[in-house]
Amino acid sequence: MTLIISIPLGAGRTKIIHEPSGTEITSEIASATGQTFSSTDLVAAGLGSCMSSSIETLAERHGVPFESIIITVEKETTSEPKRISRLATVIEVSVAYDKKIHTLFSRAAATCTVHASLHPDIDAPVEVTFTAQSRRTGLFSKD
């Protein structure tokens, strides 16, 4: 069991603490400043992170470099009822790979814990694609 602590800060902001590590992040309501994650953004981030963890071992085992992979999750919400309606995930790989890798990545991503925990009313497709140029370049100082 993991304890996550949420503390209201006012102005639609919340401090979130991962109790075991002490790591802190701040979230805000979607209509606030847009300077940080909203709670529904964190659901999308959790999904992408979970899928990343699920395919990491497969990538390593099959010689697919981590630097060639980027996972994007596009979140859509509805206003009535107010909820997440779609989390469309694309796993882009910028090195050539075979059908086996495609199948393994697709299966691992679709069976990650967060994906398996989503409400069935949320449309959550997963697509694995090859792209000639990684969109990852420049996202991190080490790239």
Image: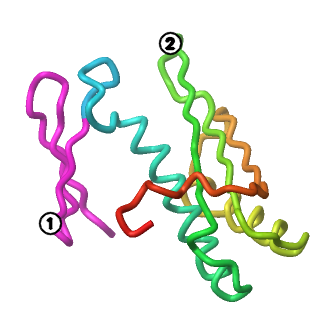
Residue placed most toward the observer, 88 or 8: 88
Position of 57 relative to 95 (above/below): below
- Residue at numbered disc 2: 79
What's the distance in space between the residues labelled 2 and 1, CA to CA?
Answer: 34 Å
Which residue is painted at 12% across and 42% down in the image?
A: 7
Magenta stretch bounds: 1-27
> Which quadrant of the figure contains the N terminus?
bottom left
37 vs 110, nearest the viewer: 37
Q: Residue 125 vs residue 23: left or right?
A: right
103 lies left or right of 54: right
Residue 11 is inside the magenta segment: yes
Secondary structure found at label 1: loop
| Residue 22: image tag | 1
- Going by the numbered disc 2, the residue's amino acid type is Ser
Relative to 127, does residue 8 appear above or below in the rendering? Answer: above
Mark 1 Cα-neighbour bin, 10 Å: few <14, some 14–19, many ≥20: few
Residue 94, by quadrant, is bottom right
Looking at the image, is mark 2 or mark 1 earlier in the sequence? 1
